[in-house]
Amino acid sequence: MMEMSLIGLILSIGLCELKSVLVLNSFGDGVKQAAGLTGDRTAAVLSTNASSVTCKLQGTTRQPAFSMDSDYVIGGVFSIHSNMHTVKHNYTTMPEPLSCAGSINSRGLRFSRAMVFAIEQINNSTELLPGIKLGYEIYDSCDSVSVAVHVAFQLSGGLDPVFNTGDKCSESGMVMAVVGASASTSSISMSRIIGPFNIPQVSHFATCACLSDKQQYPSFFRTIPSDQFQADALAKLVKHFGWTWIGAVRSDSDYGNNGMASFLHAARKEGICVEYSESFYRTHPRSRIQRVADVIRRSTAKVVLAFTSIEDMRILLEELSRKPSPPRQWIGSEAWVTDPDILRFSFCAGAIGFGIEKSVIPGLRDFLLDLSPSKVSDSPLLTMFWEEAFNCRLVKSEATDRSVCDGTEDMKMLQSSYTDTSQLRVTNMVYKAVYAIAHAIHNAVCQQTDYTTQCDKFTKLEVKEVLNQLKKVNFSQNGYDVSFDANGDPVAKYELVNWQRNESGSIELVTVGQYDSALPVGQEFLINRNLTWVEGGTQVPVSVCTDSCPSGTRKVLQKGKPICCYDCTPCPEGEISNATDSFDCFPCPKEFWPNSERDTCLPKPVEFLSFNEPLGIVLAAFSIGGACLTIITAAVFYRHRSSPIVRANNSELSFLLLFSLSLCFLCSLTFIGAPSEWSCMLRHTAFGITFVLCMSCVLGKTIVVLTAFRATLPGSNLLKWFGPSQQRLTVVSFTFIQVLICTIWLVLSPPFPMKNLTTYKERIILECALGSALGFWAVLGYIGLLAVFCFVLAVLARKLPNNFNEAKLITFSMLIFCAVWITFIPAYVSSPGKFTVAVEIFAILASSFGLITCIFAPKCFLILFKPEKNTKKHLMSRCL
């Protein structure tokens, strides 16, 4: 089944046409039988005997770009070209071999030459593989999966058209390991082919996280970190600069799709939203590339992350350069952000991204420059490179208009990615991959003695042994550690690079930070230099769907949009948010209230009727004024105590009434100021007792009027039953009842100071709680009862024919008193906060002023301004 599936794979990609059938019985493992089919070639068994098998490769072989035979051969696959010739199949003739097209990728050529340099360096070493020479077969994959698959079969079968082998055709010419390929998709395809044969594959540039799956790719290793690490690092980078709204573009390949999937997963965990995620590939129609460019131009996200290959990114930037677009901050993956050829797009100045660590490889530059026309002419690939680089031709040809090279061409003067060794990053990955394979072979065939290393080049080395040793390698080369974890991945280390414009105006790569996955969580990421941004300067551009919600507001997600798009809603009353972009507001403690910005809880202002505020001052002034008026009235009465008016109106009760009224005025002062335990008990009891004393005096005066009139009737002796002693007893008795009520109230449940937190949410009202509402209303009700009783008696006595009759005056005073206190009840219940106390004070003052005005004002007027009427004769004449 394995054999048939691999044959089907070859047929499906149109690489070959089977010419013969394998003899199954002479090849043990069915999987390795299929490996004999190398690309468009087929291994046929010509003859067999007990000891050997003669095999012939049918079809055409693909010649390597560079090759050298030796004791052990290492394969290499690099994208030296970026395109292929388009082949049209007519299905009637054998298709032409796949061939590359377009100009040479100088960077890819440098990678392949770096492999040659590393192998030559190892062959000259006396410590690594002494006495053993390594060879190489390096192929150009044309950045094509089809070619990569072809090369994979060829590397597992060799180049000899006819060969003899011990028992299996498939093992002849098999390389010990493969370096490459340059792209993830090509590496995936190659690994699926050479993996079942245990041929180790060490890639220098395939970063797809999917390749870490050892069940699918058991023989795959790489010296470049997996995209899983890069995706996490990129998400942390975006979060670091506060970008929550970004665009994303990717190559429509395994590298781009898997890398972007890893990034999007990491971005969601960091709270980053992606406005759009577009994919494209360099072979797509231009209309597809234009559509992606238009999406970038129209987007509101100012930051664009590109997970693309070099070739795809070049095509996209070329399309964007055709039509100016708003500045965009580019974030690049390691595949393109460090490529010198991309730096020519000046509108990307300020782009940032992670690159492989910059390194130095001693001697590499001299090796790369050591090319001459005679050396170049031996290699068709180097010949093509030379002619493209210097725009001349080494041999006369009618197929080109270029002039013949005159010998003045100098590689040292050539400005190309091939000769640029100032930013050796991926090249070092090739270098380390070759050394990792060399160390694995060394550990398999060499033995270390006390002083020397002995290697046996005649050892028949199995590729599986190389695979096992490769898992264990751990060494340092040029100061860089090389090892692989259980997934075949190295320790992830990146440099944060920034495109910056130098003094000459050109763009250069500047390392501004590092990322090391081996460091503790939270310490992996470090920025140690200032960055330059696309918009210029050092000001970090802002890229958010919605501006940050300030303190005092909370996020409300917009329906149908990502979580980064929201409205900022002020916190509800009584709640705050003290951080930007808060999803929730939090209530303040009971005695605190938000400030106007609703970002801090402040202590609620404490409110009570104070002597310092206008209302308190006015009420206190009226209270003291009323007391002074009462004292003045008492002084007038005392000065004219022998006058008929004073004597006729029971002077003793009058002075007692004036005394109680002065107390009534003064007790209102106890309602002003901060409540305390004593003031709360005093204000209500003093008010209740003084008012009852006042009502008792008025009631006594009313009874005296009625008694005096009834006493003038024949046979009446009422004055004997209601004389001065009885009057005093009446006042004392009525007052004692109120004192008893107040005492019971204070003993059982007295008033107490409290903080009222319910009337007003934003402030605290200091007030006196009643303690027992029944006690309060009993005190008030008793006062009202006496007032009603007094009013009734006064109404009965108001028309008695007596010039000294006070009944009319008492009637008016009681009308005012009752009106005030009837109005007081609803006003008291409905008034908020300190105004409750103000209403109570107003009721006390109004009723007190009503009493003193109605009862004493007419008498004082006569005493002071109409003395001629303050005579017994005048008053008696009015009675007749």
Image (cartoon, grey):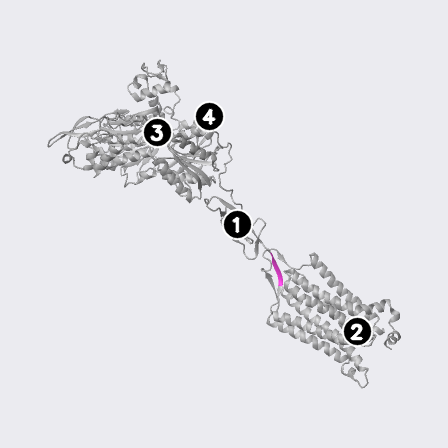
The answer to which of 23 and 856 lies nearer the viewer is 23
Location of residue 345 by image quarter: top left
Q: Which residue is mark 2?
A: 806
Tell me which numbered mark, 2 or 1, is placed earlier along the sequence. Answer: 1
Q: Is residue 737 magenta?
A: no
Amino acid type, callout 4: Ser
Amino acid type, callout 2: Glu
- Under tag 4, what secondary structure? loop
Location of residue 880 by image quarter: bottom right
Q: Which residue is mark 3?
A: 427
- Under tag 1, what secondary structure? loop
Tell me which numbered mark, 1 or 4, is placed earlier along the sequence. Answer: 4
Label 1, label 4: how far apart the Cα atoms are: 47 Å
- Work out whether 137 lies above or below 661: above
Main secondary structure along the magenta-highlighted residues: strand
The answer to which of 826 and 778 lies nearer the viewer is 826
Range of the magenta residues?
763-767
Amino acid type, callout 1: Ser
Tell me which numbered mark, 1 or 3, is placed earlier along the sequence. Answer: 3
* Count of all numbered marks drawn on residues in the image: 4
Q: Which residue is mark 1?
A: 577
Amino acid type, callout 3: Thr
The answer to which of 30 and 865 lies nearer the viewer is 30
